[in-house]
Amino acid sequence: MKHHTPQLLKFQRLQRRLGESKRGLVGLLELLWHGTATQAPEGDIGRFSNEEIAILVDWDGDHDQLVAALVETGWLDESEQHRLVVHDWSDHQPNWIRLNSKRKSSKKVPQERTYEASCEATYEATYEASCEASYEQTPNLTIPNLTKPNQTKPQERRSAADVCLVGELFQKPTQDQVAALAEAESLDVDAATWCEYYEARGWQMGKTAMRDWRAAVRQAARAGWCRKPAASKPRKRMDPVAAQIAAEYVRRKQAKPDDSS
């Protein structure tokens, strides 16, 4: 019950009609709302007889007089469907009743959606079937493709050592050709080392095929990574006189007694 309810005029009118104290009337209205919440959650208290309503609120007097006073003062409303309903029950009902009513209403929505979805599915299926039927009945008016497939033969893949990217065939040089080029242009390049290096790499310079081996030989000469091994110099023969003097010195050094002894 709201705190200002005992100050309402209809509360005071009901108090005069029933001859009940304020404390007793507050309890009577609380029992009315409590009994409605437990016995008639929708507020349709008219499902019970006047005597049962009097028992519900613990009223010992005339039950018809009680119900008539509640209707006249606006605590109960007459209804054609339920006979009697609690006035403004949506404001007085507990929160748990509101939650239950919301849950019941939310359960009805999926059923409606399901029905709508089934209608849409039926419409789509009918529409697709009609489209397929019309498509099958329509003759194919498209002209077939008259172009011939690609008649060009696939090019044979060549290794990097056999293809020249400028359009000429690449031929691997021999060791003699590299040596002849190095001698003709005075290049410090070891022909055997250079040929073995590029032979092991499939005659590729990095990720691309070699185009000109002569330019590669000149580049190696400038970088200096495959130079010719240095030739060993011949040892000079010692002069016979100097050799004799050195041998005499060694002999005397060995024959000289040790100073420490």
Image (cartoon, rainbow, N blue to C red):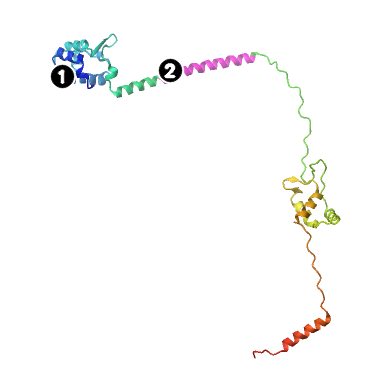
Q: Residue at x 22, y 19 (%)?
A: 5
**Rendered image: mark on residue 112:** 2
Q: Quadrant of the N terminus?
A: top left
Taking 90 as reference, is 247 above or below it?
A: below
Specify the amino acid type for callout 2: Glu
The overriding secondary structure of the stretch rendered in magenta is helix
* The disc label shown at residue 22, or none: 1
Q: Secondary structure at mark 1?
A: helix
Q: Is residue 112 left or right of residue 96?
A: right
Identify the mark nearer the N-term, 1 or 2: 1
**Numbered mark located on residue 32 in the image:** none
Tell me if residue 97 can be seen. yes
Report if residue 52 is visible in the image. no
Residue 121 belongs to the span the image colors magenta = yes
| Quadrant position of residue 87 | top left
Q: Report the number of numbered marks.
A: 2
User: Is disc 2 surrounded by few (<14), some (14 to 19) or many (20+) residues within 10 Å?
Assistant: few
| Location of residue 153 with respect to 178 vertically, above or below | above
Tag 1: amino acid: Lys
Per the image, label 2 sits on a secondary structure element best described as helix
Judged by depth in the image, the label closer to the viewer, 1 or 2, is: 1
> Which residues are drawn in magenta?
109-136
The spot of residue 247 in percent (x, y) is 78, 84
User: How would you rate the neighbour count of disc 1 (Cα within 10 Å): few for under 14, some for 14-19, many for 20 or more?
Assistant: some
Q: Residue at x 49, y 16 (%)?
A: 119
